[in-house]
Image (spheres, helix red, strand yellow):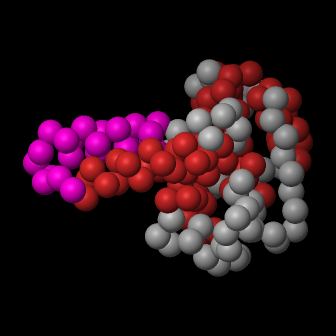
Amino acid sequence: MDQQQVSAELMRLGEILQDNDIQSPAYREASEAYDKLFLGHVTLRDLRLIKDYLPQPIPDDIIALLISTVMNGHPITDVVHVPAPIQCALLVRWGRKQKGFTQAELAEQLDMTQSQIAKIESAANGVTAEVMGKLAKALDITFTITPNDPVMSKTSPKKAS
């Protein structure tokens, strides 16, 4: 699904939600479909990491861009440019899921602990270049680090840190 198709589907579901009572079957079905489309591709955990770099509230076209990017097999970092620790967290989680690894399995492969992987994925700890290299190789991902350039394609960031 491309961005326009996702956007059209989000709009269609939004209209159903607006036009129906919250207790109606149509509302419940549309709500479930919206959640499946949105949260089935972009996790709340990822949104929490990038929320400071997105406009608030997040417009439907940006939601559609994020969803279509992930649906088409690309990490959201292809369209959201964030500081290195957040990029690392997003890419590691995406790459790990693409490979079908649990945090524990990835940790074992890299001679690390599951807790270390969890901290990397939450941007709680800094990551050395050596660890980033190991992660990139194990997950077949590429890190692109740019100095203080947290911007989003097609939008302006809410704030820059």
Figure quadrant of residue 52: bottom right
Left or right of 11, for residue 98: right
Q: Residue at x 64, y 78 (%)?
A: 159
Q: Residue 141 placed where, x, y %?
A: 81, 35
Quarter of the figure with residue 131 = top right
In this picture, residue 90 sits left or right of residue 24: right
Identify the image quadrant of the N terminus.
top right
Which residue is painted at 58% across and 48% down in the image?
Answer: 4
- Is 5 rendered above or below residue 54? above
Q: Residue at x 82, y 71 (%)?
A: 148
Q: Residue furthest left?
A: 23
Which residue corresponds to the image point at 66% horizontal and 34% vertical from the top-left? 72
Relative to 12, does residue 112 appear above or below in the rendering? above
Residue 111 is drawn in which quadrant? top right
Left or right: 83, with 142 as reference point: left
Report if residue 68 lies within the magenta region. no
10, 124: nearer the viewer = 10
The answer to which of 124 and 55 lies nearer the viewer is: 55
Q: Quadrant of the C terminus?
A: bottom right
The residue nearer to you, when weighing 90 against 34, is 34
Residue 27 sits inside the magenta stretch = yes
Magenta span of residues: 19-40
Number of marks in the image?
0
Which percent across, then down, holds residue 42? 53, 45
Q: Main secondary structure of the magenta part?
A: helix
Q: Where 91 falls versus 62 (above or below)?
A: above
31 left or right of 89 in image: left
Residue 42 visible in image: no
Residue 107 rendering spot, x and y as whole percentages: 68, 28
Q: Where is residue 155 shown, x and y percent of the image?
A: 67, 69
